[in-house]
Image (cartoon, rainbow, N blue to C red):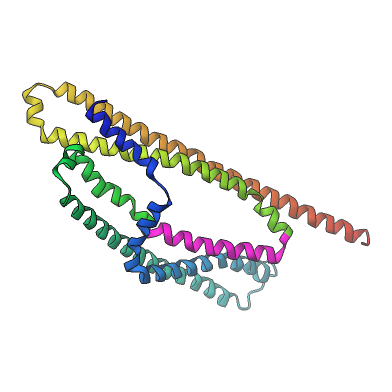
Amino acid sequence: MSEEAQKFHEEEAIQETYDFKVGKRLLRYLKPYWKTAVVALVLTLVLNVLGSLQPWFTKHAVDDYITPRQTDGLWLFALAFFGLFLFRFLFSYSQEVLLNIVGQKVMFDLRTEIYTKLQHQEIAYYDKNPVGRVITRLTGDVDSLNELFTSGVIDVLGDLVIIFAIVGMMFFMDWRLALVSLITVPLLFAATNWFRKKARVGFDKVRTRNAKLNAFLQEYISGAQTVQLFNAEKKAQAKFDEINDDYRNANIETIYYYAIFYPMVDFIGIIGVAVVLWFGGYEILTGLSASRSGF
């Protein structure tokens, strides 16, 4: 195996080292900013609660005002509805600002730590790793983690709390209908697990192809005079086309997984709605039939 092939093989093997320990190591960068993160989490919970109140407002608008043609107190109801969206706007603005401040500070710390470590690397390290690939690690890969720190962790925690609250309310209202509505959860877990595995491999390919492309560009631009001196432009062009083609194909493969996953989730959601409508309608019709029969 050539030196270049060996480098690329090592780059590809990165995906095999991923585990939850890596995620745990990354989360430690949030520790210095945990107070701001907690405030953002509270705002996320408040936003989710305010969002869940919108159907309640719609229900009362239809039942108490539109259907009975009632106008008394309508302006107060409309004012409360406007206030709900006003508070959602203010809280959403504050949450977005705080999350991005935390994310940018974490990115700053991470880049500083990586740069400091690079300064203490031996010269042999730069012989084995092209400069373009190192720059990709310091810029592109660090930026890719920004979403994890800005919205990923906080939003997941907030959504989990709201999900458990909604499920608890569903069981409180009608445990049988709640069980029926959760029948699609295993299907969602299966679809999400498939997407997670495939997308992880796809993103690893995109990342490694991008690093290889940047490494080639850095080496070619630095040695452009040497390439022209030996009249190797066509050879360099062919090599660039090959690397660029691999990078394009890796991105297309990732898009393919998204194109399957999101319609699949929508389809599973439609199945859940259909099952709930069928079961709820059956219970209503059965109850009406029993009441008419004198039971």
Measuring from the top left, give residue 2's x and y in whole percent. Answer: 24, 26
Residue at left offset 26%, top offset 46%: 137
Q: Position of residue 184 (x, y in %)?
A: 63, 48
Query: 269 or 77: which is nearer to us?
Result: 269
Q: Is residue 156 above or below residue 215?
A: below
The N terminus - image quarter: top left
Which residue is at a point 65% across and 50% down the rendered structure image? 273
Foreground residue among 18 and 179: 18
Farthest-out residue, right: 294
Viewed as shown, does residue 262 lie left or right of 151? right
Where residue 192 appears, as percent x and y from the top left, is 52, 46
- At 71% across and 52% down in the image, what residue appears? 277
The main secondary structure of the magenta stretch is helix
In the image, which residues are magenta?
Answer: 150-175
Q: Is residue 201 magenta?
A: no
Q: Is residue 179 left or right of residue 46?
A: right
Q: Quadrant location of the C terminus?
A: bottom right
Residue 162 among magenta residues: yes
Q: Is residue 283 left or right of residue 237?
A: right
